[in-house]
Structures are given as structure tokens and as C-alpha cells.
């Protein structure tokens, strides 16, 4: 029993790392709610609601449609990669002595593949954006500014809420 207690923190850490990698693999652009600026910034989530306002040219529409197809395919592949990690973790957890290093390797491979997909799709959206007129770019800029301001406001509200909870529980 003593050996089990000594091994337990290491096993738990490995399992949590493997599971963390699994949950981070929701897709190349992150899961729902991961469309903000930063590593998971999904340009598609900014542009999609603006499509009608952008008055796209026929060439831009063709590029738009191809990019949407690529993004949809990448999300499907990302989910499949995440499922592989989940299946590997589930299989290892069924064993008496799970090999979490093997799960971590699978998770790392999936994460690298998803990162490559995310960058490819992002680059397609950026290439489309590069074809925009100054007026179209202004529409996108205004939408991004509004989104950043909304996110900053949410962060501040969350921070205030957490500080007030800390003060209330510390009393």
C-alpha cells in the first residue's frame, strides 16, 4: 500500500496531462468560446457574421466558400484526432499499469497535427482578408474592436467577481 501512495501523485499527474491534452484538442481553432485574440484566435468566427456586410466580390466569395470548406474539414479532423487521444487514454486506464507516456505521445502528435491544420486555415482566412478593400477591412476592424472590448469587459467583471469572493471568504 505504501508504494501505491508514492506512485499515485505521479500517475495522477500523467493522467491529468494526458486528459488536458485531450480536452485541448477540440479542434484546430479551439472549442466553442475560444475565438478571441491569442493563440486560439479564430478569424472565421469574426468574419462569418460579417459576410453580408462585406459585399464580397465573386472572386472573394469563391475564396470564402473554399476557406469555409477547409475550416469545416479541419474541425472534423481535429475532433477525430481528439477522439484518438481519448480512445488511447480510455484503453490505458483499463490496464492494471497504464502507460501514460504512450498517451502523452499520441496527444502530442494530435496536438501538432491540429496546430498545423489551424495555421493552414488561418492563413487561408488571412489571404482572403488581404484581398479586402479598405472599406471591407474597416468593417472587420470595427467588429474585432467591439469583440475585444466586450471580452475585456467580461474579464473585468470576472476579475471583480473573483476578488469579491476572495474578500467574502477571507472575512
Image (cartoon, helix red, strand yellow):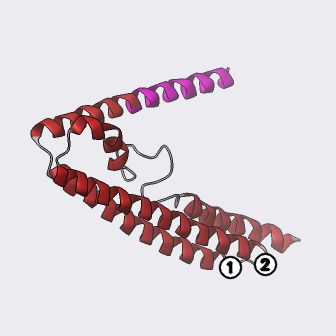
Residue 78 on image: x %, y %:
49, 64
Please identify the quadrant where the N terminus is shown: bottom right
Q: Toward the viewer: 112 or 7? A: 112
Q: Give above or below for 49 relative to 95.
A: above
- Residues 131 and 57: in front is 57
Residues shaded magenta: 151-171
Tell whether position 157 is magenta.
yes
Name the side, left or right, on which 134 lies relative to 88.
Answer: left
Label 2 secondary element: loop
113 with respect to 87 (left or right) = left
Residues at marks 1 and 2, CA–CA distance in whole angstroms:
8 Å
The residue where tag 1 is placed is 99
Prevailing secondary structure of the magenta residues: helix
Residue 77 numbered tag: none
Residue at the disc numbered 2: 95
* Residue found at x 79% / y 74%: 94
Label 1 with label 2: CB-CB less than 8 Å: yes
Amino acid at each position: 500500500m505504501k508504494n501505491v501512495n508514492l506512485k499515485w501523485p505521479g500517475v495522477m499527474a500523467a493522467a491529468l496531462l494526458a486528459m488536458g491534452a485531450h480536452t485541448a484538442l477540440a479542434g484546430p481553432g479551439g472549442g466553442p468560446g475560444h475565438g478571441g485574440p491569442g493563440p486560439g484566435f479564430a478569424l472565421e468566427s469574426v468574419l462569418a457574421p460579417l459576410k453580408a456586410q462585406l459585399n464580397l466580390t465573386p472572386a472573394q466569395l469563391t475564396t470564402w466558400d473554399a476557406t469555409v470548406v477547409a475550416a469545416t474539414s479541419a474541425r472534423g479532423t481535429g475532433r477525430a484526432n481528439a477522439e484518438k487521444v481519448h480512445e488511447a487514454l480510455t484503453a490505458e486506464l483499463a490496464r492494471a499499469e497504464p502507460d501514460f507516456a504512450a498517451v502523452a505521445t499520441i496527444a502530442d502528435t494530435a496536438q501538432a497535427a491540429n496546430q498545423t491544420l489551424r495555421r493552414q486555415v488561418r492563413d487561408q482566412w488571412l489571404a482572403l482578408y488581404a484581398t479586402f478593400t479598405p472599406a471591407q477591412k474597416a468593417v472587420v476592424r470595427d467588429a474585432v474592436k467591439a469583440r475585444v472590448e466586450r471580452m475585456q469587459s467580461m474579464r473585468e467583471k470576472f476579475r471583480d467577481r473573483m476578488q469579491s469572493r476572495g474578500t467574502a471568504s477571507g472575512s
